[in-house]
Image (spheres, rainbow, N blue to C red):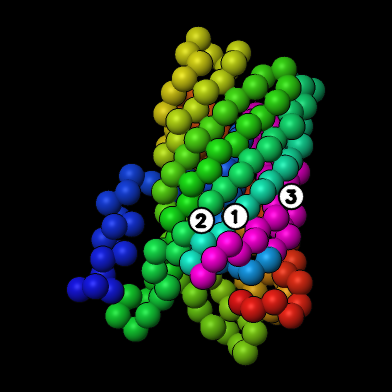
Amino acid sequence: MKRLLPVLFAMLLPVAASAQAWNYPAFQPPRLESREFNFGVADAGKGGTTLLAQWRELAGRRSQFTLEAGLIAGDGGGSNLLALGGQYAYELHRASTDVPLDFLLVTGAGLSLGDVSALRIPVGVSLGYRIELDREVNLTPYVHPRLSLDVCTDCNDNEVGLGVNFDVGANLDLSKAIAVRAAAFFGGGELFGRNGIGLSVAYRPPGLRR
């Protein structure tokens, strides 16, 4: 029963979160990394194209911090935005024989600055299943739903609303140092509701414990 408590706790949470400041995937598989630099690109149709850089750092045996920065290019000649974010993740459950899923609690805040400014404050869980393909090659399909409090200037008549979003993604570890990620993200809410896709490449400096 004790092993099931983290899983039950995660399922009772409304949805999962990231430090997103606009419409792009979190690129957050459900496992912690000692140190990681992730570089991605995402397209959300009329929501624009985002170039994103993320730095993840282990902050304890079961916790991790992330800082991210991105440039959002508006669709159809729209204005560009600067995205900044911070994130905290806590490992609720590491896959075991009884429960073969990883659960990662994630919360944070994201800010976008430009002609349109927005603040997003989300919370929730990323969960997935790790498949070992080779000694260093692993595939982790995962889902990352999230609920966020959104504040936006000049988005709509309403400047405050709730957002419900989720990613359906996969992380492929090509080695201990390199991983590639792909995610489809789906948005729904009063202020942000774009769908799209994203791709990224993650680099983990050799020699650090994983």
**Residue ID at (20%, 73%):** 1
| Label 3 packing within 10 angstroms: few (<14), some (14-19), many (20+) | some
Instruction: From the image, state whether disc 1 or disc 3 is nearer to you.
Output: 1
Above or below, 87 against 170 in this view is above
Q: Position of residue 169 (x, y in %)?
A: 54, 58
How far apart are labels 1 and 2 at the CA level?
Answer: 6 Å
Q: Do the residues labelled 1 and 2 touch (CB within 8 Å)?
A: yes
What residue occupies the far left of the structure in this picture? 1
Horizontal side of 173 relative to 140 (left or right) equals right
Residue 89's disc is: 2
Q: Do the residues labelled 1 and 3 touch (CB within 8 Å)?
A: no
Q: Position of residue 187 (x, y in %)?
A: 49, 37
Check disc 2 and report its element: helix, strand or loop.
Answer: strand
Q: Earlier in the sequence, mark 1 or mark 3?
A: 3
Q: Mark 3 points at which residue?
A: 53
Residue type at tag 3: Ala
Classified by dominant secondary structure, the portion drawn in magenta counts as strand
**Residue ID at (60%, 64%):** 58
What residue occupies the far bottom of the structure in this picture? 135
The answer to whether residue 76 shows anywhere in this view is: no
Q: Which of marks 3 and 2 is nearer the N terminus?
A: 3
The magenta stretch spans which residues?
36-61
